[in-house]
Structures are given as structure tokens and as C-alpha cells.
Image: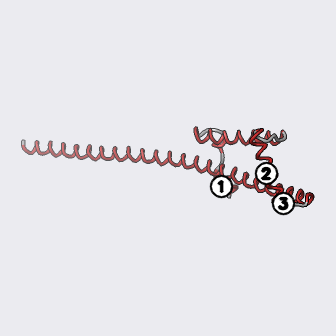
Amino acid sequence: MTADIQIAFLIATVVAGFSGWAAIAAWWLRERSKTVKGIKRLRRTNDRLQKTVVFTLDKWRDQVERHQLFLAIEQEYADRLAQQAGVSAGHVKTSVRAAVEQAWKSDGPIRTDLNAASEYRHKVAAIEEVERYVETGEGSVAEIEIEDEIRRAA
């Protein structure tokens, strides 16, 4: 009888041991799956951030290039006007900038031609698209291939 009880306790101990290890394995798998899901979520977020940064850098580069072009145009006009008026180019720039700033303050933004207005609306739409992408993760910006964009921005 004592041998039968010992066998029953041995079997109960083995079953309890296996169930304990099973509980530990279940806990480990659950934690591992949470970690894997978290890593995947971080990767998606990181991809979105990379795409947004690349898009922003690309637009920034375009803006800097346009700014350089406008500065070159400004310098050329200042040189030509200075040559005709017999004054320095710096004086022409200063006086024209002061007049434009005064007109801006009194009349509001300077009117431009229709092509420039259309381009302005396009830029505003692009900015709104990026804002929508950042807030929701959806939109045409979401389909950007990161590798091509990184190469282009570099």
C-alpha cells in the first residue's frame, strides 16, 4: 500500500512538474509574442518616420535650391539696376527690399502670376498630405519606397 501511495505521489509530482514547465513555456511564448509584436510595431513606425524625414529633406532641398535661384536673380537685377542708376548693387537691394516689405505690411502678400499661384496651391496640398500621413499613416506618401527616396535625397 505504501508503494502504491509512493507511485501515486511520484506520478502527481511528475504531472505537477510538467504542468509547471508548461506554464513557464506558455508565459515565455506569450511574452515573446508581445515582444515580437512590439518590435514589428516599432519597425512600422520607424519606416513611417524615415519616409517622412526623407520627404521633408527632399522638399527642403528643393526649397533651398529655389532660394538660391531667387538670390541669383535678385543679384542680377540689382547689378543691372545699379549699373543703369550709377549706384551700388547693395543700395538697390536695400531700397527695393524696404519697398517690398512696406508693400507687404500694408497690402498683404504680393500678387503673383497664375502659374506661381497654382504651384503654391500644389505645395500647400503636398504639405497637407504629409500632415495627414504623419497623423494617420495613410495617404499617397505611404507608398513611397524608402530605398529609392534615400538614394534620391542623398
141 vs 86: above or below:
above
Residue 73 position, x and y percent, is 83, 55
SS category of the residue bearing label 2: helix
Which residue position holds label 2?
97
In what quadrant of the picture does the C terminus appear? bottom right
Q: Residue at x 42, y 44 (%)?
A: 34
Q: Estimate the x, y position of residue 14 in percent, counting from the top left.
A: 21, 46
Mark 3 packing: few (<14 Cα in 10 Å), some, or many (20+)?
A: some
The residues bearing labels 3 and 1 have C-alpha atoms spaced at a distance of: 40 Å
Q: Residue furthest right?
A: 84
In the foreground, 105 or 74: 105
Indicate which disc, 1 or 2, sits on the residue closer to the N terminus: 2
Residue under numbered circle 3: 89
Q: Which mark is residue 150?
A: 1
Q: Position of residue 67 (x, y in %)?
A: 75, 53
Q: Is residue 100 left or right of residue 149?
A: right
User: By what rule are the colours in the image chosen?
Assistant: secondary structure
Residue type highlighted by circle 1: Ile
Residue at 45 percent across and 47 percent down: it is 36
